[in-house]
Image (spheres, helix red, strand yellow):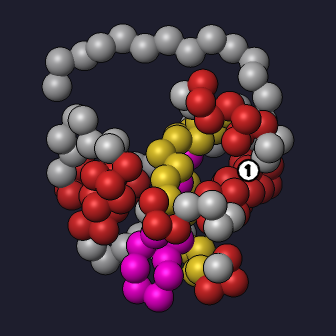
């Protein structure tokens, strides 16, 4: 499968497909719009997209100042394309981008995903905290 997937930093013409991925993953509890998702990706330091033909099947992005730390976030793959190496390939490319720019790649994830990220070289190092904000 991985051989048929095209990885690119070129943004999709239409972010409707990203909204579909978010909704299929149950990630849209904030009721993000297509415009929100486009802005989120455009304002990221780095974003990568995975396409099968013209279909967006995955995305990941990095938030960074470009100097010290790059926070990898939003790594997602359409459920029907999961377990095919797409997420790992996007992570590999995001880490390579950080290392090329001498930026430390970091991420936060749900505890259930720790072993997945450990399998690609990440290790637990800190406690993450959040604060709820009314949107």
Residue at screen point 69% across, 14% down: 126
Residue 29 % position (x, y): 24, 35
Is the magenta region chiefly helix, strand or loop?
A: strand
- 121 on left or right of 23: right
- 18 on left or right of 129: left
Front residue of 114/30: it is 114
Residue at screen point 20% across, 56% down: 35
Q: Is residue 49 visible?
A: no
- 73 on left or right of 114: left
Residue 56 % position (x, y): 42, 73
Span of residues in magenta: 50-62
Q: Is residue 102 above or below residue 78?
A: above
- What is the quadrant of the N terminus in the image? bottom right
Q: Is-magenta flag for residue 15?
A: no
Q: Which residue is mark 1?
A: 95
Residue 107 % position (x, y): 62, 33
Helix, strand, or loop for circle 1? helix
- 74 on left or right of 97: left
Residue at screen point 68% across, 31% down: 114
Front residue of 48/22: it is 22
Residue 52 % position (x, y): 50, 82
**Tag 1: Cα neighbours inside 10 Å, few (<14), some, or many (≥20)?**
many
């Amino acid at each position: 499968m991985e051989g048929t997937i095209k990885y690119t930093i070129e943004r999709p013409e239409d972010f409707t497909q990203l909204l579909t991925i978010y909704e299929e993953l149950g990630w849209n509890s904030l009721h993000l719009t297509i415009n929100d998702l486009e802005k989120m990706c455009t304002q990221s330091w780095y974003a990568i997209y995975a396409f099968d033909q013209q279909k967006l099947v995955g995305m990941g992005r990095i938030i960074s100042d470009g100097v010290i730390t790059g926070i990898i976030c939003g790594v997602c793959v359409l459920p029907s394309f999961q377990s095919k190496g797409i997420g790992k390939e996007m992570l590999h490319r995001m880490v390579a981008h950080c290392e090329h720019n001498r930026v430390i790649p970091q991420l936060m994830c749900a505890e259930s995903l720790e072993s997945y990220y450990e399998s690609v070289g990440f290790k637990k190092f800190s406690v993450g905290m959040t604060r709820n904000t009314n949107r």
